[in-house]
Image (tube, rainbow, N blue to C red):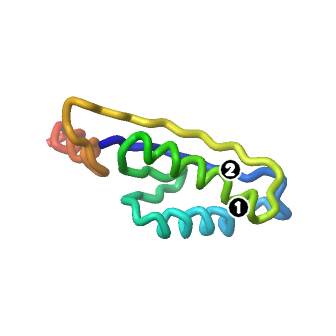
Amino acid sequence: MALMSISVVPLGTPTLSIGDYIAKIVRTLDEGEVKYKLTDMGTIVEGEARHLFKIAHKLHETPFTEGVLRVITTIEIDDRRDKEVKLEDKVKSVRARLK
């Protein structure tokens, strides 16, 4: 299991707010029935690496369907093969160390 951090930023939108575009991206995630966590600075998605790359492409394309002409997408994938990693595992590990 792998984790992907993804941030999709549409450029050249009519207003400075991009919340409507992000909501559309989250709807796209919901349609795919994947585990994800929305954060203030991006989204974390859980799945097999090959599936995460497909999801990243789909999310990157979403603002273009809304008429945006430029999109910057940043992804980071942590693909650990020695054990299964799920959403929140890293946070739990750090919190345990803080006790």
Residue to which mark 1 is pinned: 18
Q: Is residue 71 left or right of residue 53?
A: right
Q: Nearer the viewer, residue 37 or 48?
A: 48
* Precedes in sequence: disc 2 or disc 1: 2
Q: Is residue 69 above or below residue 75?
A: below
Where in the figure is residue 15, as x and y percent of width and height? 82, 63
- Quarter holding the C terminus? top left
Q: CA distance from mark 2 to mark 1?
A: 8 Å
Q: What is the residue that sits farthest to the top in this orientation?
A: 82
- Tag 2–tag 1 contact (CB < 8 Å): yes
Where in the figure is residue 68, as x and y percent of width and height? 80, 57
Q: Quadrant of residue 84?
A: top left
Where in the figure is residue 18, as x and y percent of width and height? 70, 61
Q: Say what secondary structure mark 1 lies in.
A: loop
Q: Nearer the viewer, residue 18 or 48?
A: 48
Q: Is residue 99 left or right of residue 66?
A: left
**Residue at 62% across / 62% down in the picture?**
22
**Residue at 78% across / 59% down in the picture?**
16
